[in-house]
């Protein structure tokens, strides 16, 4: 925890300060901390002061006067946390400091915090120069996102959480299509073979270098474990080698935050999250604050699209091919409407079973299945249900803004119907462009931005997880 100092902290501050200067006590006496331009922030662990930063604010410039961390707590990121705290709290436009040229440890910390040398006072400390450093307070944040949860290897750089700088997506779809679905062993092997080339490629699209990157974000869950592991371990190595914070981002957060690429999300809003593992109506009250209004009681809608594709013997990838077939058919098969009630929960297993049974029975009878019509009948019922429940939620919670997120938001019929609904109800609708609906690292870098601002950083013990229900972790 970091806070402004109290009078009762001064003895502890003095003790830590004497590590960096013999005359420390005199120094802060002279500064007269009663002036409102001077202050000290202290870093506490279990109520013990482990470090402090002393600064003065004069008009547009904030001067760091002293920064020190007690010996047993050094190399734990406390110095950086104190500087970051000052950056986030000062009203000044720039921060300046002075450091001895041989104080490599301090110089390293200041470089890490993006301070740049602007001047030198020659031989200021006897034989040593004093280096004057400065940084602007408001600096752009460039997050490098990494996504490898399934069969796309992707790396992207996004500025300030919404501006795409460069992205590379390398899909393995053609390879897996040969097997009729994603083969996990092949997927992870291909990620391993390709990920360094993807990094090289994305960097070649911009003038930025790894030095300009503020943090490395990676999808850690959910997905194929072997695939996720490649991204996670690669991100750890980049974070270690380039000394950048590591951010663990959930794939579903990525799909949600892809909407910031269209326009900055304003809260509160209603999110319809439709993917291979999720079917939810969620009230989003702030960044990473979610209230689940309705969820699926059995299968996720994307999972049903995939299952129906398999039953109809459609080629991989399932969901998009069901849509393709549906476009060429008519909804002539009579399928049961799921959950005819006014609750906001979903259930798709009955619809899925109906398709399986219908297909089976027709084959038994020696009848040919009209695949286009069955795909269209299924899609119509499934999407109608998503639209009906979204309408109920808009009415019940007096919603003014809706976003759609997840792989199923690529579905053209869903997009059209959602636009009609929101237009009719005078609700503002955002759906990410198609290229951000399929898996990509741009959305991961977007989702990592609020985490970055919140200092929600992971360490090298980060583990990939094949399953993790996102909303449980972020209840509002
Ligand atoms: P996600 O789990 O968010 O990565 O999204 C993947 C899911 O979206 C899979 O279940 C896909 O079948 C599904 N999906 C992708 N494109 C479409 C589409 N055009 N129509 C329906 N489902 C789709
Ligand atoms: Mg996805």
Image (cartoon, rainbow, N blue to C red):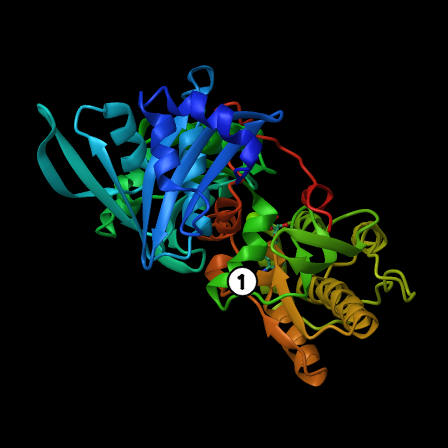
Report if the beta carbon of the residue with label 1 is closer than 8 angstroms to ligand 1. Answer: no
For this view, does 236 lie left or right of residue 127? right
Q: Residue at x 52, y 58 (%)?
A: 258
Q: Residue at x 45, y 33 (%)?
A: 231
Residue 183 lies, in percent from the top left, at 54, 33
Q: Residue at x 48, y 33 (%)?
A: 187
| Crowding at mark 1 (Cα within 10 Å: few <14, some 14-19, many 20+) | many
Residue 123 lies, in percent from the top left, at 8, 30
Question: In the image shown, does 74 or 361 lie closer to the viewer?
Answer: 74
Q: Is residue 265 above or below residue 345?
A: below
Label 1's element? Answer: helix
Q: Is residue 122 visible?
A: yes
Q: Which residue is mark 1?
A: 259
Question: In the image shown, does 126 or 396 lie closer to the viewer?
Answer: 126
For this view, does 352 lie left or right of residue 218? right
Q: Is residue 175 visible?
A: no
Q: Quadrant of the N terminus?
A: top right
Q: Residue furthest right?
A: 341
Question: In the image shown, does 149 or 1 lie closer to the viewer?
Answer: 1
Q: Residue at x 57, y 45 (%)?
A: 251
């Amino acid at each position: 925890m970091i806070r402004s100092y109290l009078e009762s902290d001064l003895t502890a501050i003095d003790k830590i300060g004497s590590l960096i200067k013999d005359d420390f006590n005199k120094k802060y006496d002279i500064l007269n901390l009663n002036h409102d331009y001077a202050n000290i922030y202290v870093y506490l662990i279990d109520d013990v002061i482990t470090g402090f930063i002393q600064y003065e604010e004069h008009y547009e410039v904030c001067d760091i006067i002293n920064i020190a961390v007690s010996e047993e707590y050094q190399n734990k990121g406390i110095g950086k946390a104190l500087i970051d705290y000052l950056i986030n709290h000062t009203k000044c436009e720039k921060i300046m400091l002075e450091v001895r040229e041989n104080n490599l440890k301090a110089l390293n910390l200041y470089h890490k915090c993006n301070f740049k040398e602007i001047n030198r006072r020659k031989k200021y400390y006897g034989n040593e120069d004093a280096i004057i450093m400065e940084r602007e307070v408001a600096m752009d944040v460039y997050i490098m996102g990494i996504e490898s949860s399934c069969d796309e290897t992707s790396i992207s750089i996004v500025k300030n959480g919404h501006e795409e700088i460069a992205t590379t997506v390398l899909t393995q779809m053609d390879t897996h299509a040969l097997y009729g679905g994603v083969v996990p062993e092949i997927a992870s092997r291909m990620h391993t073979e390709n990920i360094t080339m993807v990094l090289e490629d994305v960097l070649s699209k911009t003038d930025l270098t790894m030095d300009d990157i503020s943090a490395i974000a990676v999808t850690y869950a959910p997905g194929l474990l072997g695939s996720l592991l490649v991204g996670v371990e690669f991100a750890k190595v980049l974070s270690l080698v380039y000394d950048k914070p590591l951010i663990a981002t959930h794939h579903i957060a990525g799909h949600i935050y892809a909407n910031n690429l269209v326009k900055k999300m304003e809260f509160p809003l209603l999110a319809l999250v439709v993917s291979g593992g999720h079917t939810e109506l969620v009230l989003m009250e702030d960044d990473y604050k979610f209230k689940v209004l309705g969820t699926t009681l059995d299968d996720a809608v994307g999972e049903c699209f995939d299952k129906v594709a398999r039953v109809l013997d459609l080629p991989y990838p399932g969901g998009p091919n069901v849509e393709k077939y549906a476009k060429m058919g008519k909804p002539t098969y009579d399928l049961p409407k799921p959950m005819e009630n006014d609750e906001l929960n979903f259930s798709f297993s009955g619809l899925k079973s109906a398709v399986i049974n219908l297909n089976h029975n027709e084959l038994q009878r020696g009848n040919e299945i009209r695949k286009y019509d069955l795909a269209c009948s299924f899609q119509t019922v499934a999407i109608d249900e998503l639209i009906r429940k979204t309408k109920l939620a808009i009415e019940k919670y007096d919603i003014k803004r809706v976003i759609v997120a997840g792989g199923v938001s690529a579905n053209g019929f869903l997009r059209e119907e959602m636009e009609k609904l929101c237009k009719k109800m005078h609700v503002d609708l955002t759906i990410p462009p198609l290229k951000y609906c399929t898996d990509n690292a741009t959305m991961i870098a977007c989702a990592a931005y609020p985490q970055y601002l919140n200092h929600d950083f992971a360490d090298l013990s980060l583990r990939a997880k094949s399953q993790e229900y996102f909303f449980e972790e972020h209840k509002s």
